[in-house]
Amino acid sequence: MTADPNAANNTATATTTVINGADLSIAKTGSPNPVHTQENLTYTITVHNSGPLDAAGTSVTDQLPRNTAFGSATASQGACSFSQPTKRIVTCDLGAIANGTTVTVTIVVKPPSKKTTITNTASVSATTSDPNTANNSASATTTVVP
């Protein structure tokens, strides 16, 4: 057996970054576009979990544009409420979203009564950490015509 002449270099260090969490993303559309002042405007929001983990405690928050009238809000899982009408906020508690699963939220409003352009933004969050929050909000812009 040969003795190691430099025992000080007998260790090595490696750093591994573990990305854990649930990568939620959100997309939003408004239909029809353009919308007439007396028609319903339907916002469709899709939330997708790209994993790798299931997303727990998932919720969508949507502040409706000024001068719109709230009609309804439903989700393919969980429940939605319009509990803050003065702030015009719709909240949907979606619960757990499994890895690879998509949940749809539908919000119906009456548009403003005059010609204008409105933009509506929704965001998603969860109690599970999200490694990519850049895709956690989405907007839809709609033209309102008489």
Image (cartoon, rainbow, N blue to C red):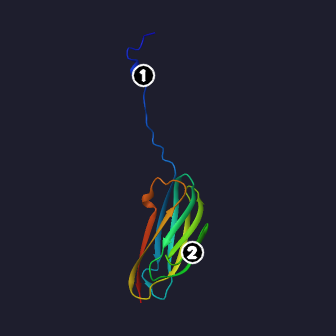
Left-right relation of 13 to 102: left
Give the class, few, some or many, for how many residues have Cα within 10 Å of label 1's Cα (few <14, many ≥20).
Answer: few
Helix, strand, or loop for circle 1? loop
Q: Residue at x 56, y 75 (%)?
A: 82
Residue furthest to the right in view is: 78
Front residue of 50/119: it is 119
Instruction: Give coordinates of residue 47: x percent, y percent.
Output: 52, 64
Residue 30, which numbered label?
Answer: none
Residue 83, which numbered label?
Answer: 2
> Is residue 138 shown above or below 41?
above
Left-right relation of 6 to 51: left
Left-right relation of 79 to 67: right
Q: Spatial distance from mark 2 to mark 1, Cα to Cα?
A: 63 Å
Instruction: Give coordinates of residue 60: x percent, y percent.
Output: 52, 66
Q: Which residue is mark 1?
A: 10
Instruction: Give coordinates of residue 35: x percent, y percent.
Output: 44, 83
Which of marks 1 and 2 precedes in the sequence? Answer: 1
Q: Amino acid at mark 2?
A: Ser
Q: Residue at x 55, y 51 (%)?
A: 53
Q: Amino acid at mark 1?
A: Asn
Dots 2, 1 in contact, CB < 8 A = no
> Is residue 69 shown above or below 96?
below
Q: Which quadrant does the C terminus fall into? A: bottom left
Q: Quadrant of residue 105?
A: bottom right
Helix, strand, or loop for circle 2? strand
Instruction: Give coordinates of residue 48: x percent, y percent.
Output: 52, 61
